[in-house]
Amino acid sequence: MTLLLTGADGQVGREVQRQAREKGHPILALNRSGLDITDANAVRQVVGETGPAMIVNAAAFTAVDKAEDEPGIAFRVNRDGAANLAKAAAEAGIPLVHLSTDYVFDGTNPRPYLETDPVAPIGVYGHSKWEGEEAIRQRLHHHLIIRVSWVFGVHGNNFVKTMLRLARERDVLRVVADQRGGPTYAGHIAAFILDLYRQIVNQETTSWGTYHFCGSPVTSWHAFAEAIVRTGHRKGILERSVAVHPITTADYPTRARRPANSALDCRKIEAYFGIHPKAWQTGLDDMLERLAKEDA
Ligand SMILES: NC(=O)c1ccc[n+]([C@@H]2O[C@H](COP(=O)([O-])OP(=O)(O)OC[C@H]3O[C@@H](n4cnc5c(N)ncnc54)[C@H](OP(=O)(O)O)[C@@H]3O)[C@@H](O)[C@H]2O)c1
């Protein structure tokens, strides 16, 4: 009943490894040098030889701005890599849990996005992830595509770590206040993936398809940054608090455009799997406590 994890060294991958080992789930965790998902033969060989009960794909090209200049690699990993995994899973007769993104939407919706809302990616990254979703749907019935958003965690680079660094270097932070979404803790994503794994291997589900999962409540990057500074100061990671001033997207141009609203409606995953959205503040508390212990 081994779980095969790809992208094992990423933010989510590291958390899935850690929690699987804590819970005693057998796991074969492969990073990019262990399994490059763009190599179709290698994917087929690993799945054939190791006989996993399920695949979790946490591998992706996630550099949103870089993807604009390097679309070839973004599509190779996010579309073709996903297709390779789906094909190998179909041949082996096993399910695939695949992570996707809120950036498949254009952000013009006035309310949180439902799984049934039309996609309209406004950048290469979102476009490549959408094509990855479609590649899976075309090849494998037994799939769960889970769209997550604004991922942060202990491992890798993310918005929280950037804010902590800037708060040590500057007296004032200026952060975009007109983009809204649900920051999602990698530890919470890992926990629900392992919950899904348990339900799948116990054959408690036949509800294949696409789901949304993100942290609550919906917030802005600016309000999230304020919480990061406040919590970092409270937990002793930051020696002082600094002011966080709101700015607009127009004040902070980036190579790739971002959706103004990428909040995800998570009621479907609650209804089908009993998996509830988690408060991002609890994820932030956990992350900063773990970072504080590492520093100590
Ligand atoms: N980060 C976010 O804010 C965010 C938001 C919404 C959705 N998501 C989705 O959530 C999932 C997990 O994201 P994350 O934040 O954990 O990503 P991450 O930290 O960037 O990790 C992705 C991992 O995939 C690996 N990888 C890249 N190309 C690969 C290849 N060809 N074969 C195998 N592994 C490869 C990377 O290895 P290298 O480091 O060696 O390249 C990295 O370890 C992704 O599907 C992402 O699209 C993320």
Image (cartoon, helix red, strand yellow):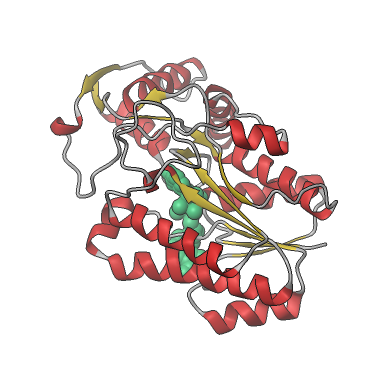
Residue 127 visible (yes or no): yes
Query: Going 54% across and 80% down the picture, which residue do you hit?
Result: 40
Determine the residue positioned at 36% across, 64% down: 74
Q: Quadrant of the C terminus?
A: top right
Q: Which residue is painted at 32% across and 36% down in the image?
A: 107
Left or right of 225? Residue 38 is: right
196 sits to left or right of 241: right
Q: Is residue 21 left or right of residue 117?
A: right
The image quadrant that residue 173 belongs to is top left
Residue 143 location, quadrant: bottom right
Query: Does residue 171 appear anywhere in the picture?
Result: no
Q: How many marks?
A: 0
Q: Can you give x and y, in whole percent of width and height, for residue 148 in the image?
A: 50, 42
Q: Residue 163, located in which quarter of the rendered image? A: top left
Q: Which quarter shows the N terminus?
A: bottom right
Q: Residue at x 27, y 23 (%)?
A: 177
Query: Relative to residue 163, is residue 201 depicted above or below?
Result: below
Of residues 138 and 183, the one nearer the viewer is 138
In the rendered image of this protein, does residue 252 appear above or below residue 129?
A: above
In front: 99, or 49?
99
Name the outermost residue toward the right: 202
**Above/below status of 104 relative to 176:** below
Residue 102 in percent (x, y) is at 42, 42
- The image position of residue 240, as x and y in percent, is 37, 16
Locate residue 91, reporting x and y percent. 68, 77
Give 94 or 64, whichever is nearer the viewer.
94
